[in-house]
Image (spheres, rainbow, N blue to C red):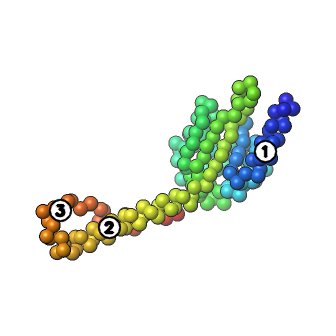
Amino acid sequence: MQLINNDYMKFQNFASASSQCIMISNTLNKITWVNDALTNLTGYTFDAAIGMQDFKLFTGEETELVHINALKSCVCDLNSIKKEMVLYHKSGQQIRVELSKEPIYNNVQKLSGFLVTISDISHKKSISTDATIKAISAAYQFQQQVTTNTQPFNAFAHMAVPIIKLPQIPLYQKLKVA
């Protein structure tokens, strides 16, 4: 038992220094430990998180029910999951994350809890959204130029291909950028 405690202490020391958000929960999915990186991302301190269940602590209005259910079923079915999802900071601010949850087994293959790692992908998602908006905008502008100024293209009419149909109201005006 001393060896397991020593290994656990070593893990806590390494995980505490990590910039990766790490959380450990017991077999009932009650949080038993979080590192400082998780506190920095979510606003929940070690003391505030202890004893809470992850799907209750970090989820909110726009967290998809399918993701909440996946977190719960991971505990019941002893499966690993990896999901991109919306979680919430203690202040209520949305955070787009990639969450990974793995069952942890001891040296005799008995379940001892779950290891959760969380990566903030909010910046990556906003870059992806910006690129999509720019691509839609460029396609819309090209279509507008082609449909309003067709004279240069008349010589090539026999080679014409259908123009991409875009919505009447440009989609890039409807999208919200986080």
Residue shown at 77%/47% (left/top)? 14
Q: Dot 3 lies on which element?
A: loop
Name the image quarter holding the N terminus: top right
Q: Dot 1 lies on which element?
A: helix
Residue type, numbered disc 2: Tyr
Q: Earlier in the sequence, mark 1 or mark 3?
A: 1
Image spot of residue 9 (x, y percent): 82, 41
Residues packed near mark 3 inside 10 Å, few (<14), some (14 to 19) or many (20 plus): few
Q: Which mark is residue 140?
A: 2
Q: Which mark is residue 34?
A: none
Residue type, numbered disc 3: Ala
**Residue 12 located left or right of residue 157:** right
Residue type, numbered disc 1: Gln
Image spot of residue 79 (x, y percent): 60, 33
Determine the CA span between mark 2 and mark 1.
53 Å
Determine the CA span between mark 1 and mark 3.
65 Å
Residue hosting label 1: 12
**Residue 45 located left or right of residue 126:** right
Residue hosting label 3: 160
Residue 139, quarter of picture: bottom left
Q: Dot 2 lies on which element?
A: helix
Residues packed near mark 1 inside 10 Å, few (<14), some (14 to 19) or many (20 plus): some
Q: Earlier in the sequence, mark 2 or mark 1?
A: 1
In-front residue for pair 9/54: 9
Residue shown at 20%/59% (left/top)? 161
Determine the CA span between mark 2 and mark 3.
18 Å
> Could you tell me if residue 44 is visible in this image?
no
Q: Which is closer to the viewer, label 2 or label 3? A: 3
| Marks 2 & 1, CB-CB < 8 Å contact | no
Q: Which is closer to the viewer, label 1 or label 3? A: 3
**Residue 121 located left or right of residue 10:** left
